[in-house]
Amino acid sequence: MKKEILSMTVEELEELLLSIGEKKYKAKQIFAWLHKGATFEEMSDISKKTREKLKELTFLYYPEIAQKYVSAIDGTVKYLFSMHDGQLIESVVMRYKHGNSICISSQAGCRMGCRFCASTIGGKIRDLSAGEILSQIIAAQKDLSQRIDNVVMMGIGEPLDNYKNVIRFLNLVGAKGGLNIGYRHISLSTCGLADKIECLAKENFPITLSISLHASSDEERSEIMPINKKWCIDELLLACRKYFDETGRRISFEYTLIHEKNDTPAHAIKLSKLLLKYFKGVPFHVNLIPVNEVAERGFKQGSEKSIQTFIAILEQNGINATKRRRLGSDINASCGQLRAANATKKG
Ligand code: SAH
């Protein structure tokens, strides 16, 4: 079977070149070309003979733009990418003062089953390879002719449910001579696979970990997030605390505010107590996200006043909390919805 070349490290490319009697140093040139989105034909400083051999032995595919939307309000760009087997995934580029951030997908679909989330509606179809995760950044950067500065793994899929490929991706994205994006500019969001969080802490990538918490009691969390039946809040927060102790990286907790389900003042008090139980005296952050009203899910947003009250209660307890700015509201920029809409159309 052909090797997928975008998933290969420089060292693996070197080995491949040596195995076909080529010079090792060419690996770095090929790696740089690949991460710029070049085809084999475009690799002008690599001999035709070598390119032909690489074509024989490896497989190269960049995501095709199936649909692209640009927000008239804030310039957010949303891509629906088609992968080599026709699977559709989404990536979103957000424009901030401090640079471009991309939100990328880690799986085609998702099997975590969170009740408010559009990405999980059709289940998980397959994992994305490391190269496919990376190729979303390459394709967006090429299409926009602009550098992507920050990466958030918050698109379709559960990154820690595709652990091996995500770790390989992290190795590739930070590589010098490739995209070279610093780990402090990368965040990974998880619904809470506690065992994998502990593994990640040992990998030595100083990335930011975001935890999709969304509730402060096991009963309420299990109702909206099935993963909580496997790893309860206590196990999850202990793993997060270990992550902080080992990496020194501040954890960010995401809390989706759902009207009357988890957004009352009593919920804010309970959330404060819970987080302070594990994180008193150490830095952490709470990101509040008014629920995105996905038609199939039936959850509603609360009023702006209820959101501000929620934030005020957290702040009174000394907790650093912000409401997430909603970008790309005119193009449905939140992930999972385009893919789901296209599946509905086809089905
Ligand atoms: N699987 C990972 C990353 C993907 S989801 C995770 O669960 O963290 C990215 C974030 O968007 C998560 O915090 C998720 O809970 C949240 N999210 C999903 N659907 C949403 C919706 N309808 N409204 C608001 N936030 C949502």
Image: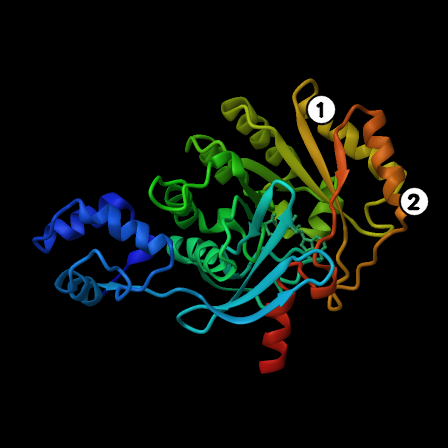
At horizontal 66% and vertical 55% (from top left) the residue drawn is 114
Q: Amino acid at mark 1?
A: Lys
The label on residue 157 is none
Query: Mark 2 — residue?
Result: 305
From the viewer's perspective, is residue 192 above or below residue 343? above
- Residue 156, given in percent of the width and then of the height, sits at 56, 58
Check the image and report above or below for 146 versus 266: below
Q: Amino acid at mark 2?
A: Lys
Quick one: 338 or 110, which is closer to the camera? 338
x 63%, y 67%: residue: 69
> Which numbered tag is attached to residue 277?
1
Q: Secondary structure at mark 1?
A: helix
Q: Residues within 10 Å of mark 2 (few under 14, many from 20)?
A: few
Q: Nearer the viewer, residue 313 or 18?
A: 18
Name the quarter where the N terminus is drawn: bottom left
**Outermost right residue:** 305
Q: Nearer the viewer, residue 171 or 257?
A: 171
Its colouring scheme is: rainbow
Q: Quadrant of residue 249?
A: top right
Badge 1: residue crowd in 10 Å (few <14, some 14–19, many ≥20): few
Q: Is residue 16 left or right of residue 287?
A: left
Q: Position of residue 180 (x, y in %)?
A: 41, 41
Closest to the camera, between mark 2 and mark 1, is 2
